[in-house]
Image (spheres, rainbow, N blue to C red):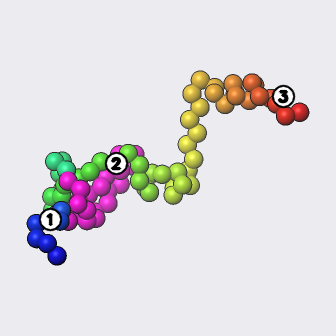
Amino acid sequence: MKNDIHPEYNNIVFRDLGSGETFLTRSTAKSDKTIELDGVEYPVIDVEISSASHPFYTGKQRIMDSAGRVEKFNQRFKGFGK
């Protein structure tokens, strides 16, 4: 194996912005932000969604209906296919 060609593989924390859950794992990803977890400071990467907040894993569906789009769609195609 060649020397000095592989990225550093260190402990890192992934923080879910939706639920606030943190996951300590190992990765080659780098970050300038840090977080203290169990008395040790680790680099942290913020993610918008993870298994802690994803509807598939939590079983909680979030329906976002802005400006009645579903009603508009149903009204437009209510007689379609008859």
CB-based contact (under 8 Å), mark 3 and mark 1: no
Q: Are marks 2 and 3 in contact (CB under 8 Å)?
A: no
Amino acid type of the residue tagged 2 in the rendering: Val
Front tag of 2 and 3: 3
Residues at marks 1 and 2, CA–CA distance in whole angstroms:
28 Å
Residue 69 covered by magenta stretch:
no
Please identify, in this view, whether the residue under mark 3 or under mark 1 is nearer the observer: 1
Residue under label 1, please give it: 5
Which span is picked out in magenta? Answer: 8-30
Indicate left or right for 34 with 24 as reference.
Answer: left
The first of marks 2 and 3 along the sequence is 2
Q: Earlier in the sequence, mark 3 or mark 1?
A: 1
Say which mark, if any, is on residue 79: 3
| Residue 38 visible, this angle | no
Residue 67: image x %, image y %?
A: 59, 23
Sequence-earlier tag: 1 or 2 = 1
Give the residue displayed 23% in from the left and 60% down from the top: 28
Q: Amino acid at mark 1?
A: Ile
Q: Is residue 4 left or right of residue 55?
A: left
User: Could you tell me which secondary element the residue under label 2 belongs to?
Assistant: strand
Residue drawn at the location 25% of the way across and 65% of the way down? 26
Asked if residue 17 lies in the magenta stretch, the reply is yes
* Residue that label 2 marks: 47
Q: Amino acid at mark 3?
A: Gly
